[in-house]
Image (cartoon, rainbow, N blue to C red):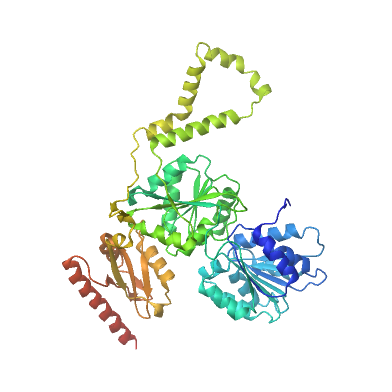
Amino acid sequence: MGFEIPMPVQQEVIPFLLQDARDLVALAHTGTGKTAAFGIPIIQQIDPSSTKTQALILAPTRELCLQITDDLNNFARHFENLNIVPIYGGANIVTQIKQVAAGAQIVVATPGRMLDMLKRKKVNVSAISWLVLDEADEMLDMGFKDDLNAILSGTPAQKRVLLFSATMPREIEAIARSYMKNPEEITVGSKNRGAENIAHQYYVVHAKDRYMALKRIADYYPDIYAIIFCRTKIETQEVADSLIKDGYNADALHGDLSQAQRDSVMNRFRTRNLQMLVATDVAARGIDVTDLTHIINYNLPDDMENYTHRSGRTGRAGKSGISIVIINLKEVFRIKQLEKQIGKKFEQVKIPTGSDVCEKQLLHLIEKVKATEIQHKEIGVFLPAVYELLKGLSKEEIIQHFVSAEFNRFLSYYRNAADINVELRKEGGRSGAGLSSGSRSGSVRLFINLGQMEKFNDHKLKAYILETANIPHLQISRVEVTRSCSFFEMDSQRAEFLMEKFKKEKFQGRRVQIAYAEKNNKRKGKERGNRDYAKATNSFFAQKRKRR
C-alpha cells in the first residue's frame, strides 16, 4: 500500500494494542494515520472463522464511516472470509441488514443508524471484543452523546475500548471514566494543540470587504485546493453562489442538500473538479480529502475548538498546509484566544494588492506553459501556417501578444483595485483593535425568553437565532442559557434589526421575545432596554402561569 515509515500515532498505538490488554485514549488530529493505528492490530486479532461481530467502530459521519471501511478492506485484502460492513444513514437499511446477517466480524457505523439497527435487533454487539470511538469529540459536538451512551450500555463489560479524539473536552473525559478501565493515554503532539506542519495566518479587513478578500486570496494562489468554512447554511450557499457567478470553480456543502447532491459535490471535490468547497462545520465533518493546500475561515467558528478541527483538514499525512482566518477589527482579539487554544502563533498577512495578484497569476501561467508537453506529431502539420502568421514579429512581441491574449481579463479587473488591508491602530504601544475591551465597545447584550425548558443549550440556541434571523454575516457571542431564558451578545448596530426579525416569531406556539438585557451606552437605549426586558420577562412568566 506504499507504507514505508509508520506515522507517529502508528508508532505509539500499534505496539501498545498488540502487547497490552488495557483500554486506550489516543489524542491525535485527523489525517495522522489513526485508521491504520487501530485497524491493523484489530484485523490481526480478529477470528475470521467466526461470523460473530467482534469489533464495532463508531464514526461521526457517513463519509468517515465509508473511508474507514475502505481502509480496513485494503488492510485485510489477503484475509479470507473477513467481512467488514459499513452501517450509515442515507442508504438502504434493508441492504445493510442483509449484509450484517451474512456475517460481519467488523461493523463500522454512524451512531444514529447503529442505534436504529440495535433497536431492530439486527446487529448483535453482545460479544464484541473491540469498541472504537473515532473522532469522539466530533460525535459529541454533533449531538450523539445520548446515542453513544445507549450503544455503549448494550456492549459487554469485557471488551477493549479505544477512544480517538483530536481534543479532550470534559465530555470525552466523562466517557473515559464511565466506560473505560484504567485506560492508557497516548498523545501525539499536545492536547488541544494544532498540528505542527500547518501555518496559521490571519487577514484583517473591513467586514464589507470580506468576500473581496476571499477572492484576492483565491486569485493569489492559482493552484488552491481548499475548504472555505462559513458559520451558517445560508451564508455557505451565498458565498458559493457568488464564487460560481464570478467564475471560480466552487460549490457548497451544507445540511440542506440531499444525500445525492452531497455525494455529487464530494465526488467532484475529491477528483479536483472543484478547487474550492464552501462548507459548514457540521457538513464538513468526516471529510477525508488529502492534499488540501488551504483551509479558509471565512468566519471564525463560535466554538473555538472547532478551529482545531477545521485547520486539521490540511497538512495531513505529514504534508504542509495553510490555515487562513479572515477577520474584521472587532474580531482581532479572538486571534489571541486561538493562539492560546492551539499553542501556535498566528502571522498577520497583508491581503494581496491587484499588482501582487497579477504578478502571481502571470508567472503561474508562464510556468504552466513551460511545463506543457509538446505533441510534436499532432501539431507539426499546423506549424507552417502558424509561423507564417507570426512572421515579422520579434520574440518579445510574440510573448507580449501571447500574455495579453491570456491575461487581459485579470489585468482589466485588477487595474484600479483598491488596497483593502486595515491597519491595526497602535495605542500606548499596543494594538488597540486587538484588545477585547475595544472589540466589545460596539456590542450589546440581549435577552431571549427561551432556555433549557425548551431543550436549548448554547450551541442549539445560537444556531436557532442565526437560522431564524437570516441576517448575512450576523455574529453572536457569549451565549448564556438558563432554565427559563438566555442571554447573548451581538453588534449593537444590528440589535434593533434582529428584534424586528423576531417580532412575529413563535416557538412551540409561544411568541419569542428579544430585548436589551443590560445597560446600553445611549440613555434612550438604556431606558428602552430596561422596559423591553421587564415587558418580556413579565410576558414569559404570565404565559407560564397560564399554562399551569
User: Which residue ends up furthest to the left in the rendered image?
Assistant: 523
In percent of width and height, residue 495 lies at 27, 63
Looking at the rendering, which quadrant does residue 374 occupy? top right
Q: Which residue is drawn at 57% across and 16% down?
A: 386
Q: How many marks?
A: 0
Q: Which residue is drawn at 68% across and 82% down?
A: 157
The residue lying toward the viewer, choosing from 361 and 427, is 427
Q: Which residue is drawn at 35% across and 49% down?
A: 205
Q: In the rendered view, does 539 fall on the left or right side of 231?
A: left
In percent of width and height, residue 46 lies at 77, 69
The residue lying toward the viewer, choosing from 106 and 371, is 371
In percent of width and height, residue 371 lies at 60, 31
Q: Can residue 229 be seen in this view?
A: yes
Q: Is residue 104 visible?
A: no
Q: In the rendered view, does 541 fall on the left or right side of 481?
A: left
User: Which residue ends up furthest to the top in the rendered image?
Assistant: 392
In percent of width and height, residue 200 lies at 48, 52
Q: In the rendered view, does 439 fall on the left or right side of 380?
A: left
Answer above or below: position of 89 versus 397.
below
**The C terminus, quarter of image:** bottom left
Q: Residue at x 56, y 32 (%)?
A: 368
User: Which residue ends up furthest to the front in the rendered image?
Assistant: 429
Answer above or below: position of 95 versus 429.
below
